[in-house]
Image (tube, grey):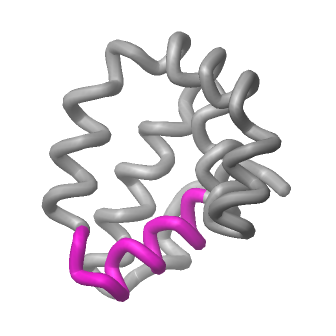
């Protein structure tokens, strides 16, 4: 699983639940903590996968990449605009 694919799936799920604006605020607020979030994701990843299933796997794939949060923001913007294929891979 790659971060761009995971970002697209997460963005689609977020848009489906109409949570794009709160998710965007949350991601933007936590961007400076990206490396720390990646470390925490590596530590709790197995439990996240068990508890959240495929969305948990997608979240872990996104935070494990250095530019994962940026990709998620791009994917959320594209999903909101209705152009999920416009996200660079």
Q: Residue at x 33, y 14 (%)?
A: 32
Would you place residue 51 above or below residue 38 in this image? below
Provide residue 7's location: percent of width, then percent of height: 56, 58
Provide residue 18's location: percent of width, then percent of height: 23, 81
Provide residue 68's location: percent of width, then percent of height: 56, 37
Q: Main secondary structure of the magenta part?
A: helix
Q: 51 left or right of 10?
A: right
Provide residue 21's location: percent of width, then percent of height: 15, 62
Q: 87 left or right of 60?
A: left
Would you place residue 74 above or below residue 41 in this image? below
Q: Residue at x 68, y 48 (%)?
A: 48
The quarter holding residue 46 reads: top right
Q: Residue at x 70, y 32 (%)?
A: 44
Q: Is residue 59 magenta?
A: no
The magenta-colored residue range is: 7-19
The quarter holding residue 16 reads: bottom left
Q: 28 left or right of 83?
A: left
Would you place residue 53 above or below residue 69 in this image? below
Would you place residue 80 above or below residue 7 in this image? below
Q: Quadrant of the N terminus?
A: bottom right
Q: Residue at x 46, y 51 (%)?
A: 72
The quarter holding residue 25 reads: top left
Camera-nearest residue between 8 and 36: 36
């Amino acid at each position: 699983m790659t971060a761009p694919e995971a970002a697209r799936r997460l963005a689609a799920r977020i848009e489906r639940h109409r949570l794009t604006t709160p998710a965007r605020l949350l991601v933007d607020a936590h961007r400076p903590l990206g490396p720390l979030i990646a470390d925490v994701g590596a530590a709790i990843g197995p439990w996240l996968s068990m508890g959240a299933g495929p969305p948990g796997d997608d979240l872990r794939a996104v935070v494990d990449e250095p530019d994962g949060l940026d990709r998620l923001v791009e994917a959320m913007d594209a999903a909101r605009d209705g152009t999920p294929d416009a996200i660079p891979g």
